[in-house]
Image: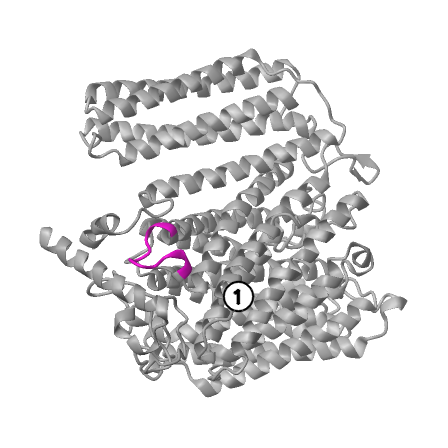
Amino acid sequence: MQHTQFLQPDQQPLQPLAMHPRKFIVWLFMVSIFMMFAGWTSAFLVARSEGDVLNIELPSLFTISTVLLVISSVTMHLAIRSARRDNLQGLKLFLGITLALGVVFLAAQWTGFARFMEMDIYFVGGTAVQSFMYVLPFMHGLHIIAGLIFVGLVLYRAYRFKVHSKNMLSLEMCATFWHFLDALWLYLFLFLTLNA
Amino acid sequence: MIAKQFLVTGLLWAFIGGSLSIMFRLQLGFPEMSQEWLRPLLGDWINSSGKIDPEFYLALVTMHGTIMVFFVLTAGLSGTFSNFLIPLQLGARDMASGFMNMLSYWFFFLSSVIMFASLFVETGPAGAGWTVYPPLSAIQTSISGAGFGLTLWLISMTFFIVSQLLGGINYIATIINLRTRGMSFVRMPLTIWSFFLTAILGLLAFPVLFAAALLLVFDRSLGTAFYLSDIYIAGEALPHVGGSPLLYQHLFWFLGHPEVYIVIMPALGITSEVIATNARKPIFGYRAMIGSLIGISVLSFVVWAHHMFVSGMNPFLGSVFMFLTLIIAVPSGVKVFNYLTTLWRGNIVFTPAMLFSIGLVSLFISGGITGIFLGNAALDVYLHDTYFVVAHFHLVMGAAAFFGMMAGVYHWFPKMFGRMMDNKLGYIHFWMTFVGVYMVFFPMHYIGIAGYPRHYYSWTNFDAFSGFTDLNQFVTIAAIITFSSQLIFAFNFFYSMFFGRKAPANPWRSNTLEWTTPAEPGHGNWPGEIPTVYRWPYDYSKPGAIEDYIPQHIPYSMTPGSNLPHENELADREKDDDAIVVDDTNKH
């Protein structure tokens, strides 16, 4: 079976979207996650159009967490580059930094919620728009936790010498997912900045 | 294996869902009748005057809808046949991820267990309608059916969505990545095309339902106000302000409408396959069939608001959605005409599967035509929430999808269990079901035009609806007959599973790859090498061919008699391909 699979690309022109099925599965997961957030953000717009304009200013902490997440995307990319060059030390270092940045990001988001409360914006008791200020970062945070578990697993594999230039699949899947979470947060951040 | 698990679970749900409908039909058809005999089953839901409790009636309707739409026609239909046919018809050893596939079933199982348990909680199962509209559903104390039963309903649906997403992602990845050599997209059987697009719809629509449901959970359990505003209970205003119940409807129907195509498209795909095989003719307009499936899929996402014409939306917006809705008639019409032209002058073999497929086409026409009425915003103002709607969607999506499922079961039973189902019982099952379904739902159109509203426990208290009692009795009797004829099917199904006649390798003389496997495919599906595909799946009755069918794995070079000129060129190229294969195998 392996045999015929490996022969295929030699004999046929590369097919559209030809990639490892698991990697493709990651992309499909990302599509469904995006749809979920698209549902919430459009619901946000509907709720706002019902006359509930608040002019909420996002806590500056969210800007900091955004920067942290972008940096973690960069370190994730550096991890990939290290792995491609079989620089295992660098791989572990950069994956570790990514993991740490992710945790700090979560902490920053959590503190951001505290700022919301100082601003008299509550999850319960306020209007739908106010609740959304919690729902969107919180649900994104849940996905970040999933992403962190993924990063942790890959880091563990890296310590077992299972991630290197000839075995990039898990790292590449992890990186794709991490960049996606980064992009998703950028979308949410811009969305909230512009619409809240 | 997972396909069989889905199938058996789905069929069990079908019987549960069906028996619920018989209970409420009895109430509607014979409002004076004593239901005392149901007390052993329903306990205190039969009230002291021997009637079904009105709140339990709502729960029956809700659970019937939920079970039929999600558990039978989504999981039971596409869960079964996608899992079964995608690897076999594509020539794959297994799905892209066997593990996810297993998870998909067990999440479904878990969700089934929770939903089943919710039937037995003290406050009764969910009773807020299968659409669980807020504010009714968002306040736990509004009705007893919005209490613990609805909480379980929401948990169960969450697991169901997870199951569907895992399954759907797996189907898409398998279809895109694991086709055998030569299986290009335009050589895929239409079944695969329909499963593919169904999975895409599910992937895009179910997360939005999850998003909507999660906000509903927040409203119910944590006290937020996404869907609630200005609600007064006993003169007291609730603290929730600033939400909008219409928001839920938008989110829900953004799933809800694609969901009906998630239900019907696999049935249409199965029908394409069964009709072409048993008419012994190539499917008419193969590419048009694919095009119309794609058209339906795209349109399904831009018509959700036609469920909300009377929600006070801007009439201009209403006409936009009306326009988009009516356009769906075009791809649907293309499909119907292609089915008819495939049948036209075919050498038809009336197997039970074929009868159910033709039945599907009939139901799809009858139900589709009333869709044109209802899609019309102006007419919908009158017809919405009447039995006209009930009749419409039961014919076009309920019964039609059910017929597709039955066609699939009869057609692929030999492949699943290595034995044949009994044809005679199949014919009896078909005719009773076919006539029965029309007997049930045709009169409902009249009742609906007469203004009879849905969800009503009883009409006898209203002067306006005191007529038509006889028609309602007729519907109930027809429903009972239709339901009992399903017992014939159940017997046939389980009996044949163990004692049926042993099936030949290719009982319907069909072209697709699943019939090239051993009678009961084991792990890996094919014991030897995976067959290579050389042609499309619909070479039936090709002029000049020795037999009236040429399976997909037969190269053109082996059928010189029937090749068209351009296929002779392909035959030459096949030889080149084979040469390369030999080279490569030597190299390794």
Q: Residue at x 84, y 38 (%)?
A: B235
Q: Residues within 10 Å of mark 1 (few under 14, many from 20)?
A: many
**What x and y, as percent, mark residue A10?**
23, 48
Q: Quadrant of residue A166?
A: top left
- Decide if residue B156 is in sight here: yes
* Pick the front one: B580 or A163: B580
- Subunit under mark 1: B
Helix, strand or loop: magenta stretch: loop
Q: Is B186 drawn above or below residue B205 in the view shown?
A: below
Residue B10's place in the image compared with A40, above or below, is: below
Against A153, residue B505 (above or below) is below
- Across and down, in percent, residue B563 comes to 34, 73
Whether residue B433 sits left or right of residue B532 in the image: it is right
Q: Give the magenta-colored segment's residue range.
A: B176-186
Q: Is residue B52 visible?
A: no
Q: Where is residue B190, by image quadrant? A: bottom left
Q: Position of residue A191 (x, y in %)?
A: 59, 25
Kind of element beneath mark 1: helix
Q: How is the image coloured?
A: one colour
Residue A68 included in the magenta stretch of the image: no
Nearest the eye: B562 or B180: B562
Query: Seen from this angle, which residue lies furthest right?
Result: B463
- Residue B179 in magenta? yes
Give B459 or B423, whichever is nearer the viewer: B423
Residue drawn 73% across the image and 23% down it: A53
Quadrant holding the N terminus of chain B? bottom left
- Residue B31 rendering spot, x and y as whole percentages: 76, 72
Amino acid tagged 1: Leu
Residue tagged 1:
B268
Numbered disc total: 1
State left or right for residue B145 relative to residue B268. right
